[in-house]
Image (cartoon, rainbow, N blue to C red):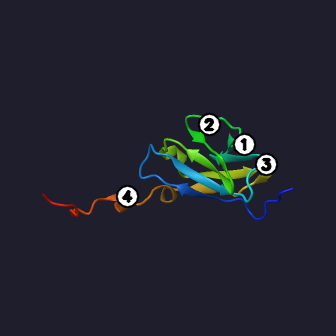
Amino acid sequence: MIQVSGVLEWTVTGKATDYGQNVTLFCHVPNCCPKDAGWDRWTPVQRTLFIDVKTGRPNKKYDGKAEKDGYTLIIQNLTKDDLNVSYSCLYGVTLGQSKFLLNADVFTNKSDNKPTGRFSGIQM
């Protein structure tokens, strides 16, 4: 029997640069996933997104998959409605900590991708 020690907590592992892109949340569970692994969204009432990421059918908004050290929730086509609400991961009978998904968590710094204006190639 596998015991999950500590508190289930998710992190953002796949960020976006703008709305309309996908964002990935990751819930760390060692030796995942013999038990049901799912996700809840709180707005402020609890709404189950996936009962089990291994068998759940993706829809236009949410997808997920099990990995060896946890499982993911992929929020597809990110909108403002997906932010500033709480998500929690659920593993077996353990409900993880409910945590807000904030703008700062989701978006990569757009200035990192801006060209510098310098040309470093071969000029003809």
Look at the numbered disc 4 and give the secondary structure of its residue: helix
Residue type indicated by callout 2: Pro
Residue type indicated by callout 3: Lys
Task: Find residue 110 and name its label.
Answer: 4
Find residue 36 and report its horizontal and vertical position in percent: 76, 46
> Where is mark 3, residue-wise?
35
Q: Which numbered disc flags the more N-terminal residue, 2 or 4?
A: 2
Marks 4 and 3 in Cβ contact (< 8 Å): no
Task: Find residue 58 and name its label.
Answer: 2
Residue type indicated by callout 4: Lys
Q: Which numbered disc flags the more N-terminal residue, 3 or 1?
A: 3
Q: In the rendered image, is residue 98 in sight?
A: no
Judge the density around disc 3: few (<14), some (14-19), many (≥20) Cα neighbours within 10 Å.
few
Q: In the rendered image, is residue 88 in sight?
A: yes
Q: Which numbered disc flags the more N-terminal residue, 4 or 3?
A: 3
Q: Residue at x 79, y 48 (%)?
A: 35
